[in-house]
Image: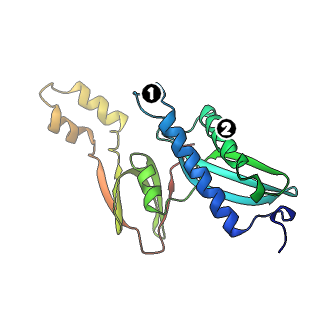
Amino acid sequence: MANVKDKILISEEAKALVEKAIFSAVEKLNADIEIDVDGGLLGIEVVEVKFSKEHGKLNVTVFIWKKGGIAFEDCEIAHNAVDVALDKLEDLFPSDYVLNVSSMGLDRKIVSDDDFRRATGTEIEVVEESGKQHGTLISYDAESFTIRIAAKKPHPKAAANDESGSEAENNEGGAAKSGAKSPKDIQFDRNNGKTLVQPYIRF
């Protein structure tokens, strides 16, 4: 049997052990470290672990997530914790490997229940054959998900006309006259195999 260290990419069995160690290290990190943000825990979550070969070396990339976004300090803290955990598994690795810790990236597709959970309350884009729509993800289940499209602001001229009118024409009457619209909720099928869901990126 060949020595695992002679290989650039480690075995599937070794990958499973490495992934388990990484998840455990970050879970322990969250339990041990408290930060002064709403009195809560660190809140870092491992999304995915990828193994690749780059420049002749094994690269282990850990993608992490945290509500409110990942900062450089989060990557640094998680990297240190994972690095310590993987040092204990050095026999599984080639003689040299590179550990990377990164946020998920804005182009990551939203597919699994965990993806939808993390995206709840954020703006997402839904791409169908009929076109694109974007809004805030407000709910999901195994069969569908719902986004809320924000109310459109009234046209500047309509708003100006409304402001120059009677003070009595406010609330519902004023909104109707100015052309303002209420938020709209739209439900989509998760399982039709044709709908692409991803974070919405504002340019």
- Residue 167's tag is none
- Residue 24 horizontal/vertical position (percent): 55, 49
Residue 135 in sight? yes
First in sequence: mark 1 vs mark 2: 1
Q: Residue at x 27, y 45 (%)?
A: 181
Q: Residue at x 36, y 67 (%)?
A: 142
Residue that carries the numbered disc 2 in the rendered image: 80
Front-most of residues 146 and 78: 78
Front-most of residues 163 and 137: 137
- Residue 15 horizontal/vertical position (percent): 68, 62
Image marks 1 and 2: residues in contact by CB distance under 8 Å:
no
Q: In the picture shown, does residue 55 fall above or below 26? A: below
Front-most of residues 200 and 158: 200
Horizontal side of 170 relative to 190 (left or right) equals left
Q: Secondary structure at mark 2?
A: helix
Of tags 1 and 2, the one toward the viewer is 2
